[in-house]
Amino acid sequence: MKTTLAREYAHPDKQYADAAGNAQVLPNGDMFVGWGRALSISEFAHDGELLFDLRSEYENKTYRAFRFPWSGKPDERPAVAAERTSAHEVRLYASWNGATEITSWEVLAGTNQLEPLSSVPRNSFETAMVVHTTDRHVAVRAKDRSGRVLGTSAAVEPRT
């Protein structure tokens, strides 16, 4: 039998896998390479250009690397902190560590039963917002781009 080299992905620093490396062809034609015991991961364009290069610490050793779409869905509820800034105004801070699908936060307010009050786009790890309400409790709902509710925080009484 005879083999022919079809393509080669050479690391510019002469990186190689002496044991346990792997390679994954990505949907766009790029090559994702785990350099095994060398504790490195690289991504190459189809033409061999190095696009991404990671060097890991020894305590994070792995012998294979793969790249797949990932979506974070935390087990805990979203978090909210609220502060009453005047008799009719509340400043809220909403976050949900690890959640990747949030596109907006809906603010809920009420005394006995919470009702939707307003909605704001998520703009960072912790989204700040101001609402006008005299209600005793507030909470937030995380929503995805289609408006589906991903999670709701506990109701809190704004601190003064």
Image (cartoon, rainbow, N blue to C red):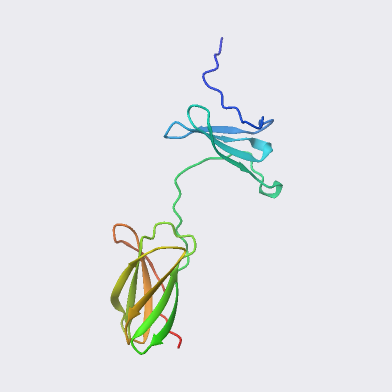
x and y, in percent, of residue 97 in the image: 49, 64
10 vs 76, nearest the viewer: 10
x and y, in percent, of residue 157 in the image: 42, 85
Residue found at x 36% / y 87%: 136
Find residue 156 and report its image quarter. bottom left
Residue found at x 38% / y 88%: 86
Q: Along the horizontal axis of the image, is 128 left or right of 66?
A: left
Find residue 151 and report its image quarter. bottom left
Q: Along the horizontal axis of the image, is 125 left or right of 3?
A: left
- Quadrant of the image containing the N terminus: top right
Find residue 152 and report its image quarter. bottom left
x and y, in percent, of residue 84 in the image: 41, 85
Residue found at x 42% / y 35%: 27
Whether 25 is drawn above or below 131: the answer is above
Whether 57 is drawn above or below 37: the answer is below
Whether 10 is drawn above or below 157: the answer is above
Residue with the most extreme top position: 1
